[in-house]
Amino acid sequence: MSMNTFGTLYRVTTFGESHGAAIGGVIDGMPAGVKLDLESIQHQLDRRRPGQSAITTARSESDRVELLSGVMDGVTTGTPIGFIVRNSDQHSRDYDNMRHVFRPSHADYTYAGKYGVRDHRGGGRSSARETIARVVGGAVAMQALRALYPDMCISVYTSRVGDICMRGDGIWYAPSLIDSNDVRCPDRAAADAMRSLILDVKGAGDTIGGVVTAVVRGVPAGLGEPVAGKLHAMLGAAMLSINAAKGFEYGMGFDGCCRRGSEMIDVMESRGAGEAPRFISNHSGGIQGGISNGEDIVMRVAFKPVATLLREVATVDDSGADTTLHARGRHDPCVLPRAVPVVEAMAAMTLLDAALLNRSARII
């Protein structure tokens, strides 16, 4: 069983807990001969790390990655890449009052039901700190993808917080524009409103959710399997494995499913002999029949409000008695800004896995 392993040919196994010594992982299936840019990997971790702004958790971690194996002279060898990111700013005592109390809407009760034991310190294995390993795996995968498909690039951004939606959602934006504000929304007016809302919610001891949009350019036609391994199913499984993810849609999504077929089909036109056809629209979100069609892949991931509220809430303890909990500690009032690089990482790992599977399926 691979309960902590993601992928088929490109596989990432993660380990570690929020308040343990470190978070780490092992990447298997990375092609040999890829020159790794370590600064690029660290940059993605810096985008995910806590304590980066007033709208994220105040936990202070440098999140410096250490590569342990699988790389020689800066080039991948094809053998497993082991890596580790050490924890240094755990405040485990902040969770002492939760040792015997189940936090509502957290994994406390379900972990106890599954394992008979749980790590109450920051959620243990269910903590979003586990996504550190995914970000490393995704940053490595992206470098392999660029070697295979030089034109491929991924644009991921916050498109909605609460009831505030950006203009121009669903198109590709430059990373510099996305990172120009701490909400990671390329619409500056919407970003300012989102930031104010997050701060208001934080001040009230509450939390709020929203939506992250991902757009991938330069994906060739042919990635994905026709039945059990549809590309959108692979992407959906990847995104829904992220902490706090509650929904996934691609292309026209739920809204388009309520419209007429005449409104939603993607009409094709010829570009001339020997050229790939052009799609006049992209309601399919770059995927048809479970296989990429060469257009931009467009998808959205919905994230719930963080379950830890810095106010008193009713719950029960592990003896079954009613009680109340007033959570302490450092928590994100909104996960979206730090979820952006995680969504990007999961997209990269999934697309590399699909690309490697596609290569193994062809002899010409």
Image (tube, rainbow, N blue to C red):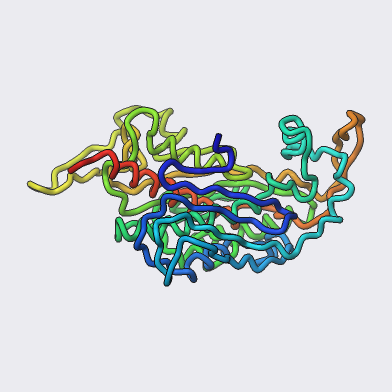
Quarter placement of the C terminus = top left
> Left or right: where does residue 132 sit relative to residue 213?
right
Q: Is residue 263 something one can see in this rendering?
A: no
Quarter placement of the N terminus = top right
Q: Name the spot of residue 245 as percent of width and height, x first.
A: 59, 42
Nearest the viewer among 331 and 170 is 331
Residue at the spot 42% in from the left edge and 60% down from the top edge: 173
Q: Name the spot of residue 239 as percent of width and height, x first.
A: 52, 43
Nearest the viewer among 287 and 117 is 117
Q: Is residue 39 above or below residue 216?
A: below
Residue at the spot 89% in from the left edge and 28% down from the top edge: 320
- The part of the image, by quadrant, that contains residue 145 is bottom left
Q: Name the spot of residue 80 as percent of width and height, x first.
A: 47, 54
Residue most extreme to the left? 273
- The part of the image, by quadrant, that contains residue 234 is top left
> Left or right: where does residue 169 sit relative to residue 192?
left
Nearest the viewer among 356 and 80 is 80
- The part of the image, by quadrant, that contains residue 102 is top right
Q: Name the spot of residue 325 as percent of width and height, x first.
A: 87, 43
Nearest the viewer among 329 and 122 is 122
Residue at the spot 13% in from the left edge and 44% down from the top edge: 270
Q: Is residue 276 above or below residue 191?
A: above
Number of numbered callouts drawn: 0
Q: Is residue 116 above or below residue 307?
A: above
Residue at the spot 71% in from the left edge and 31% down from the top edge: 114
> Left or right: where does residue 50 sit relative to residue 133?
right
Q: Is residue 24 something one can see in this rendering?
A: yes
